[in-house]
């Protein structure tokens, strides 16, 4: 599963940080394989169900999330910054894109990407002429 | 603007803090969360990362801790020390060879911090939402700012 960056939206080096809208965080992910297919697990702290956007276009999986803090005041001592999340992956042809399932719990997104049913082996009858 | 006399020890202390801050900020400048979470030993760093703020009534500590087991969260206060402990469970029933990527850390953590003011330990509340932990600490009565009226004669 290769990682891709299709739109030029991702944070790039040498781009002035004043372009606030373009600044995104790449969430850390775990990807593993089980009997059904692939599972993608991403940490998206501060992202609620309404603010997460997972889509598949041209075999590209895009995970976007808008993070919102719960603290009522501006931080005075700051170790982290809640920016929007953005990350893309190239999907293989074997993924059944219609059956992708996603769940979000406690800021962790879990995506199930099942594999397509394998083409069933067919018996070919041989006619003896 | 601070008005103070020049004190060499104070200057040295400032320098020490400045140098300390450079190391604190290491790996933390443009995308703090992602950069840090890619480091192999998550436990080697202060975890969870937190933002601290205050208003005249309360101190707020917001911590970045997605995927915790909420039952494992422990928040304790001892004097001016705030201690938070908990566990981020790893993925269960996954064979190591089944992983394509493994960037999220997991495990138990403990972090303590010194609070900026005295707080009323009985009134402290903690909330865990969308992977963020918010601890609200009402200030102790003697730590609240007092308005002093100026009488003009």
Image: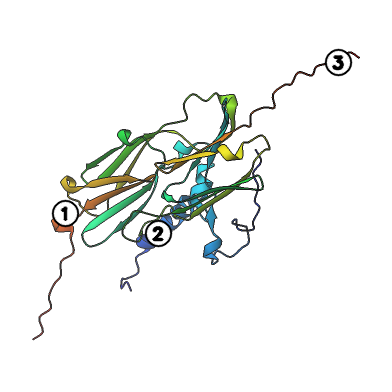
Marked residue nearer the N-terminal end (1 or 2): 2
Residue in view at x 15 percent, y 66 percent: B146
In the picture, the quarter occupied by the C terminus of chain B is: bottom left
Give whichever of B18, A113 is nearer the camera: A113
Identify the colour scheme used. Answer: rainbow
Q: Say which chain tag 2 marks.
A: B
Query: What's the distance in space between the residues labelled 3 and 1, CA to CA?
Result: 93 Å
Residue in view at x 61 percent, y 63 percent: A15
In the shown orientation, is residue A16 left or right of residue B133?
right
Whether tag 3 and tag 1 are in contact, CB under 8 A, the answer is: no
Residue in view at x 12 percent, y 78 percent: B150
The 10 Å Cα crowd at callout 1, few under 14, some 14 to 19, many 20 or more, is some
Circles 1 and 2 on the same chain: yes
Q: Which mark is on residue B140?
A: 1
Which residue reaches farthest bottom?
B153
The image position of residue A26, as x and y in percent, is 55, 49
In the shown orientation, is residue A79 left or right of residue A39?
left
Which residue reaches farthest top?
A128
Query: What's the distance in space between the residues labelled 1 and 2, CA to CA?
Result: 33 Å
Q: Say which chain tag 3 marks.
A: A
Whether tag 3 and tag 2 are in contact, CB under 8 A, the answer is: no
Secondary structure state at the residue bearing disc 1: loop
Query: What's the distance in space between the residues labelled 3 and 2, CA to CA?
Result: 96 Å
* Tag in front: 3 or 2: 3
Secondary structure state at the residue bearing disc 2: helix
Q: Give the residue at mark 3.
A: A127
* Tag in front: 3 or 1: 3
Secondary structure state at the residue bearing disc 3: loop
């Amino acid at each position: 599963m290769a990682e891709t960056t299709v739109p030029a939206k991702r944070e790039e080096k040498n781009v002035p940080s004043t372009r606030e809208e373009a600044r995104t965080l790449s969430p850390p992910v775990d990807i593993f394989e089980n009997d059904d297919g692939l599972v993608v697990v991403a940490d998206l702290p501060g992202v609620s169900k309404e603010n997460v956007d997972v889509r598949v276009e041209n075999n590209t999986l895009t995970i976007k999330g808008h993070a919102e803090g719960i603290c009522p005041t501006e931080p005075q001592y700051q170790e982290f910054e809640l920016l929007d999340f953005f990350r893309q992956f190239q999907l293989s042809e074997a993924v059944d894109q219609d059956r992708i399932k996603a769940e979000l719990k406690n800021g962790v997104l879990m995506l199930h990407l099942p594999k397509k049913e394998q083409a069933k082996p067919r018996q070919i009858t041989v006619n003896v002429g | 603007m601070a008005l103070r006399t020049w004190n060499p020890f104070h200057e040295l202390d400032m320098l020490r803090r400045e140098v300390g801050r450079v190391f604190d900020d290491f790996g933390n400048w443009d995308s703090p969360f992602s950069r840090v979470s890619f480091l192999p030993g998550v436990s080697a760093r202060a975890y969870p990362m937190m933002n601290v703020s205050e208003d005249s009534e309360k101190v707020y500590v917001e911590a970045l801790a997605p995927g915790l087991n909420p039952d494992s969260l422990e928040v304790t206060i001892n004097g001016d020390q705030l201690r938070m402990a908990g566990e981020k469970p790893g993925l269960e029933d996954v064979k190591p060879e089944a992983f394509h990527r493994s960037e999220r850390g997991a495990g138990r953590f403990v972090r303590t911090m010194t609070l900026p003011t005295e707080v009323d330990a009985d009134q402290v509340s903690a909330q865990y939402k969308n992977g963020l932990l918010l601890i609200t600490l009402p200030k102790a009565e003697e730590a609240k700012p007092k308005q002093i009226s100026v009488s003009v004669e």
